[in-house]
Image: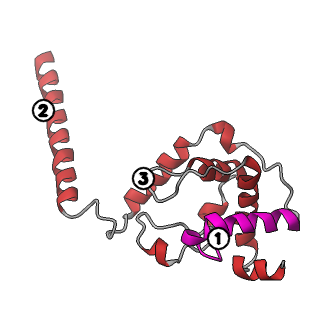
């Protein structure tokens, strides 16, 4: 009886492993790693969950120490223009020529799934980047990064682009 149970478990595991290997092979043969093929819902969900797990709890609970004064937001906009604009665009939507070739897509910073991130999560992602995407780790000061977090919050509040805001503050 016990031998049958062990044999059944071994057969089940073997079939499961073979099914996973066959599915993986099929995925790769179909162009699954091409940047032209956009990720499906399952791949997106798995990546989002992995990203969430990769951010330490201490980072998630960090609060932005810089108040959203006009001066701080303007300084953040300057830094955004110098570092983030090429991919995220003037309005944070991520619809630039550079961003078109990215897979996964450059996120729209105005969307609820980005805005629901805590300030600490945003800080962590800017500072450390996101592996297997085009998001680099930035060697900016903590103050600069916190000001970028202020800018990301501004994108959700007002449809003003970086360019028009910069013109208004000259």
Q: Is mark 3 on a helix, strand or loop?
A: loop
Determine if residue 161 is in view: no
* Residue under pointer 2: 11
Q: Which secondary structure dominates the residues rendered in magenta?
A: helix
Mark 3–mark 1 Cα distance, whole angstroms, equals 22 Å
Which of the two discs, 3 and 1, sits closer to the camera?
A: 3
Where residue 150 sits in the image (x, y, percent)?
A: 76, 61
Q: What element carries label 1?
A: loop
* Colouring of the image: secondary structure
Give the magenta part as a residue range: 70-91
Find out whether residue 87 is within the magenta segment. yes
Mark 1–mark 2 Cα distance, whole angstroms, equals 50 Å
Q: In this view, does 86 lie above or below 137?
A: below
Which of the two discs, 2 and 3, sits closer to the camera?
A: 3
Determine if residue 148 is in view: yes
User: Which residue is at a point 45% across and 57% down the rendered structure image?
Assistant: 133
Q: Do the residues labelled 2 and 3 touch (CB within 8 Å)?
A: no
* Residue under pointer 3: 132
Q: Indicate left or right for 64 with 111 as reference.
A: right
Q: Is mark 2 on a helix, strand or loop?
A: helix
Where residue 117 sits in the image (x, y, percent)?
A: 65, 55
| Residue placed most toward the observer, 74 or 132 | 74
* Residue under pointer 1: 110
Q: Are marks 1 and 2 in contact (CB under 8 Å)?
A: no
């Amino acid at each position: 009886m016990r031998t049958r149970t062990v044999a059944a478990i071994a057969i089940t595991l073997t079939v499961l492993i073979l099914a996973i290997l066959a599915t993986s092979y099929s995925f790769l043969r179909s162009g699954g790693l091409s940047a032209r093929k956009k990720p499906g819902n399952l791949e997106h969900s798995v990546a989002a969950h992995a990203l969430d797990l990769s951010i330490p709890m201490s980072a998630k609970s960090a609060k932005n120490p810089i108040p959203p004064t006009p001066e701080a937001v303007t300084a953040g906009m300057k830094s955004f223009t110098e570092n983030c604009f090429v991919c995220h665009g003037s309005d944070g939507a991520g619809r630039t020529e550079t961003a078109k070739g990215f897979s996964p897509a450059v996120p729209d910073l105005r969307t609820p799934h980005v805005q629901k991130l805590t300030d600490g999560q945003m800080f962590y992602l800017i500072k450390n980047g996101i592996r297997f995407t085009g998001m680099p780790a930035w060697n900016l000061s903590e103050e600069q990064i916190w000001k970028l977090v202020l800018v990301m919050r501004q994108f959700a509040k007002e449809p003003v682009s970086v360019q028009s805001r910069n013109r208004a503050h000259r």
